[in-house]
Image (spheres, coloured by chain):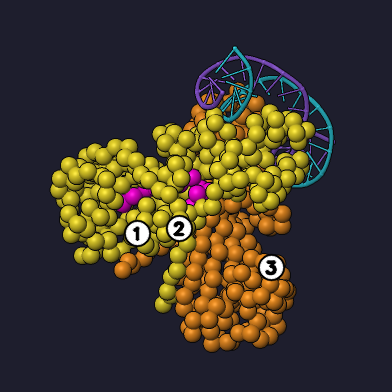
Chain colours: A yellow, B orange, C purple, D cyan
Amino acid sequence: MQYLKIMEAINEQIDAGLLVAGNKLPAERKLAESFNTTRVTLRESLALLEAEGKLYREDRRGWFVSPQPLRYDPTYTTNFPEMARQQGRTARSELIQARLIPASRRAASLLKVPPLSEVYRIDRVRFLENRPVVVVTNFILPRFFPGLLERSFTHSLTTIYREEYGVLYSKTRYRVRTTSLLGDTAQHLRATAGSPAMLVERLNYDQHGNVIDCDLEYWRHDAISIESTATLD
Amino acid sequence: MQYLKIMEAINEQIDAGLLVAGNKLPAERKLAESFNTTRVTLRESLALLEAEGKLYREDRRGWFVSPQPLRYDPTYTTNFPEMARQQGRTARSELIQARLIPASRRAASLLKVPPLSEVYRIDRVRFLENRPVVVVTNFILPRFFPGLLERSFTHSLTTIYREEYGVLYSKTRYRVRTTSLLGDTAQHLRATAGSPAMLVERLNYDQHGNVIDCDLEYWRHDAISIESTATLD
DNA sequence: GAGTGGTCTAGACCACTTC
DNA sequence: AAGTGGTCTAGACCACTCC
């Protein structure tokens, strides 16, 4: 069980601060040599550290030490840059696309509309300290937001909802699962296909109890820690 | 990218119902041969399906198709067997140990007591349909539950709290992260060291607002889907 | 006892990043 | 142009499970 020993050795170097958050590790061949093993075995150790959220990979670019995860409370409406700012982080979003499309099967089932109904779809990538950490896809019911696509998306969606349409989030239903990154989602996050990820799905209601939109969030799983408080009955 | 194609092929067989939840896959060598590749590449595909939660591994026993995940709402106090029953699942718990010990660093920090304060520690494994899916460790403040260890643990902790000590859960603070299974935890779950996992930490308060206990739950990550509803302000 | 999964070796080629 | 990570091959041995 070499690979466990190598994992522990690298782990200790991280905890001791010899490997700093955000920094790149030496090349795999060099690491393999310094641990006196082959690349295959070394990569097993690295994959383990990736699973634990201590390291992450950028496709073809190498291995990096994971920064602290962002604490994410699904019961808050706070927009993303604001949430990041409260934790002393630097955040920004990039729009991938915003279009009117026939709802995907998953979106239709969440929004409880017939399959292929037209909905707005907005895709964005969000960055923490210039690292892409989450791809967010919103599916939005057009009847509550006529002309939404003509707006600019420089403000957060919640702000546009509130200020231009008088719509407030009042309730959210969320689900969290682990999955892996594939295709475009992986690419936007600079991840290798198959990297472990966290999927957060949310279904949002307005102040009148109507379902207004849902979102699918694919997170680099080391970048997020889901935290919340609940009052029980 | 053979391994993606193999992954898709196996995925389709699962979706088509050719591979049934809970069933074992053919031996790795046979699968490798039938996909005309080597074991190393095949195992990459299997690991990917494991990351997605479609397959799971039992250490040295082979690969199995994952059953539906249990929907887990951290804001409910419902005990585990009851929660499973409501979803038509068969559940049981096994006690690993129950002792009075000096609090670990993590437990002391969560419970906000000095390091090495004495606390009860109760470890249990929980099964769904005879598959071990989660190792739960409770750290309990003894001053609220004198003589707790003399009780039998045939009932759920929440029941003992309520009926024998008049203590009710009123608030819970929870945190969800991905991690990997190591050491004893892995063994209790029949998992290979390094298997992906979901860590749920909870800090529980009684009806007077006192912290009474905390728990660390290491889940086979394919066995759980965290779902909840929140009302926003 | 046969077969299986866990682990490891020692290479190779390619496409991409980086300089 | 050099170096790197992504992917793949073709083996091997051991400890364990299962019959």
Residue located beneath label 3 in the image = B104
Q: Which of the two discs, 2 and 3, sits closer to the camera?
A: 2
Name the residue rendered at 64%, 40% in the picture. A46
Structural crowding at the residue carrying mark 1, measured as other residues with C-alpha within 10 Å and reported as few (<14), some (14–19) or many (≥20): some
Of helix, strand and loop, which mostly describes the magenta segment? strand
Same chain for the residues at labels 1 and 2, yes or no? yes
Relative to the observer, which residue lies in front, B31 or A219? Answer: A219
Crowding near the residue tagged with mark 2, few <14, some 14–19, many ≥20 C-alpha atoms within 10 Å: few
**Label 1 amino acid?**
Thr
Q: Is residue A183 magenta?
A: no
Asked if labels 2 and 3 share a chain, the reply is: no
Residue type of the residue flagged with mark 2 = Gln
Q: Is residue A152 left or right of residue A71?
A: left
Q: How many residues crowd mark 3 within 10 Å: few (<14), some (14–19), many (20+)?
A: some
Res. B126 image quadrant: bottom right
Which is closer to the viewer, label 1 or label 2? Answer: 2
Residue A87, disc: 2
**Looking at the image, is mark 1 or mark 2 earlier in the sequence?**
1
- The residue that appears at 59% across and 37% down in the rendered structure is A24
Could you tell me how far apart the alpha carbons at marks 1 and 3 are, in whole angstroms? 34 Å
Q: Quadrant of the C terminus of chain B?
A: bottom left
In this view of the protein, which residue sits in the foreground, A54 or B92? A54
Q: How many marks?
A: 3
Instruction: Tell me which segment is drawn in magenta.
Output: A214-224
- In percent of width and height, residue B60 lies at 71, 44
Q: Nearer the viewer, residue A179 or A74?
A: A74
The mark found on residue A78 in the picture is: 1
In the image, residue A192 sits, relative to residue D3, either above or below, namely below
